[in-house]
Image (cartoon, rainbow, N blue to C red):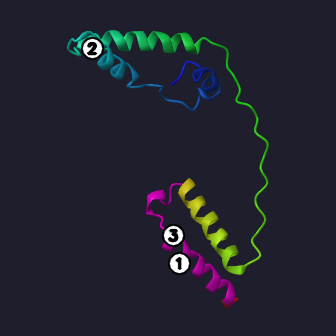
Amino acid sequence: MTDDTIPYLTAFAHRIASIDSQAYGVSARIAARRCGQAKTDRLVADHMTQWLLRQHARLDRPSRQLPVQPEVPPPPEPADPWERVIAQARREIRDLIETGDLDHDEMTALWTEQWAADIYGAASAD
């Protein structure tokens, strides 16, 4: 996290369980390497303490709001029936991924096309 991140997160404090990080561990490893010494538990604990103190100081900063982005209108529906069902299949799949009912890494172009073919077939049957 950068120094500027936490003030934007304070508005979501009720939703954030932890801002724990391994940043202190990475910092300790870099410091140990630069000094030519071992990365001892004491060194890591010192870096963790400093990291924690910096996080607490950042939490004392005033809350900040992210800039409001204008809403982008959805693209128009494709005129071609096949492209229309491909777009519908992508929307349905995206909704399932967003709700956690489907993993994004399960998706392939062929799977999307099969989904669209099922939609197309169901619409043709009606």
Question: Identity of the amino acid at label 1?
Answer: Gln
Residue at 48% of width from left, 67% of height from top? 108
Could you say where residue 93 lies in the image, as x and y percent from the top left? 57, 64
How many neighbours does mark 1 have within 10 angstroms: few (below 14), some (14-19), or many (20 or more)?
some
- Comparing marks 1 and 3, which lies closer to the viewer? 3
Q: What residue sits 50% from the left and 59% below the top?
A: 101
Which segment is the magenta one?
A: 99-124
Residue 51 drawn at (x, y percent) = 43, 14
Name the disc covering residue 103, or none. Answer: none
- Gap in Å between the C-alphas at discs 2 and 3? 47 Å
Task: Assess disc 3: are there few (<14), some (14-19) or many (≥20) residues with their C-alpha within 10 Å of its C-alpha.
Answer: few
| Screen quadrant of the C terminus | bottom right
Among the two numbered marks 1 and 3 on one chain, the one whose residue lies closer to the N terminus: 3
Q: Is residue 71 above or below residue 64?
A: below
Horizontal side of 80 relative to 114 (left or right) equals right
Give the residue pinned by disc 2: 32
Q: Which numbered marker is on residue 114?
A: 1
For the stretch drawn in magenta, the main secondary structure is helix
Q: Which residue in the protein does label 3 denote?
A: 109
First along the sequence among labels 2 and 3: 2
Element carrying mark 2: helix
